[in-house]
């Protein structure tokens, strides 16, 4: 869509991902691939003019820093990127929704959106959350990548990782990083993943994000809720 065709009340969805290890079998861009796909498909379900910006591929991934390939810009730099992105978009767009694919970005999203809303910008965020899914590079993300980008999944390198739920390991994870919990970087078990399951998961994620964006209710954490 060219500049003259964009109405004043246009909604812009900004995919937010990360560049970080996802075990030996998934690409560094996993979170970005998911966020981009969800944003693009959700935009087609939202009433009115909904545009999708290029994805922001770097996030706050310090917990993965011990693994080669991870590129983390940290919370402070990420906050500035998010704030300035919305300030720029607000010159011509009516609303901005971040579609987040990486859990490590959430605290920064809350802080950035709080600043922006105090400035009067109409902005919120929605996560690509799978209730009951495993934490990182397990069956959940592997299934989704088998659906979205099967050529990037190295099936022969799949192996189970740390099996305990995220809630159990989170304190040590925050203190010592992912490698202390899982030498492979996997939190979960990818070996049961399937493209069929990934297709269903993406459908659920898209429906959830589209519903949140369409309802446009922003809670006190900056999150879009129904």
Image: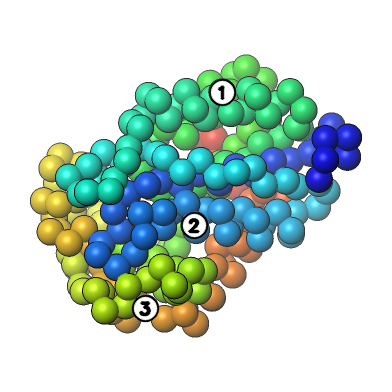
Q: Within 10 Å of the Cα at label 3, are there few (<14), some (14-19), or many (20+) other Cα atoms?
A: many
Return the disc, 3 or 2, that comes first in the chain's sequence.
Answer: 2
Tell me where residue 180 appears, x and y as whole percent: 11, 51
Q: Residue at x 47, y 23 (%)?
A: 80
Mark number displayed over residue 193: 3
Element under label 1? helix
Element under label 3? loop
| Residue placed under numbered mark 1 in the picture | 84
Tell me where residue 103 appears, x and y as whole percent: 38, 47
Query: How many angstroms separate mark 1 from mark 3 (CA)?
Result: 38 Å
Tell me the quadrant of the picture where the N terminus can be found. top right
Q: Residue at x 77, y 28 (%)?
A: 92
Query: How many angstroms separate mark 3 from mark 2 (CA)?
Result: 17 Å
Q: Residue at x 47, y 80 (%)?
A: 195
User: Can you say whether 225 is above or below 157 in the image?
Assistant: above
Query: Left of 211 or right of it: where is 201?
Result: left
Mark number displayed over residue 33: 2
Tell me where residue 22 appears, x and y as whole percent: 30, 58
Query: How many angstroms separate mark 2 from mark 1 (CA)?
Result: 23 Å
Asked if the residue at tag 2 contacts the one at tag 3, i.e. Cβ–Cβ closer than 8 Å, the answer is no
Q: Within 10 Å of the Cα at label 1, are there few (<14), some (14-19), or many (20+) other Cα atoms?
A: some
Q: Residue at x 62, y 28 (%)?
A: 86
Query: Left of 182 or right of it: where is 139?
Result: right
Element under label 2? helix
């Amino acid at each position: 869509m060219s500049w003259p065709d964009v109405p004043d009340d246009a909604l812009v969805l900004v995919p937010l991902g990360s560049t970080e290890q996802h075990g030996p079998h998934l690409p560094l861009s996993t979170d970005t691939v998911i966020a981009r796909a969800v944003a693009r498909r959700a935009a087609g379900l939202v009433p009115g003019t909904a545009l999708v910006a290029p994805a922001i591929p770097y996030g706050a991934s310090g917990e993965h820093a011990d693994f080669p390939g991870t590129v983390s810009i940290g919370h402070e730099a990420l906050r500035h990127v998010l704030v300035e992105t919305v300030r720029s978009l607000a010159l011509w767009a009516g609303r901005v929704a971040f579609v987040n694919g990486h859990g490590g970005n959430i605290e920064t999203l809350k802080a950035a959106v709080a600043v922006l809303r105090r400035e009067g910008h109409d902005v919120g965020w929605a996560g690509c959350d799978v209730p009951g899914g495993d934490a990182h590079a397990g069956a959940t993300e592997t299934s989704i990548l088998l659906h979205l980008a099967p050529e990037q999944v190295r099936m022969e390198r799949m192996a189970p990782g740390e099996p305990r739920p995220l809630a159990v390991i989170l304190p040590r994870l925050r203190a010592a990083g992912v490698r202390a919990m899982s030498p492979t970087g996997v939190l979960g078990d990818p070996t049961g993943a399937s493209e069929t399951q990934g297709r269903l998961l993406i459908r659920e994620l898209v429906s959830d994000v589209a519903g949140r964006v369409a309802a446009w209710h922003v809670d006190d954490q900056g999150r879009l809720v129904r």
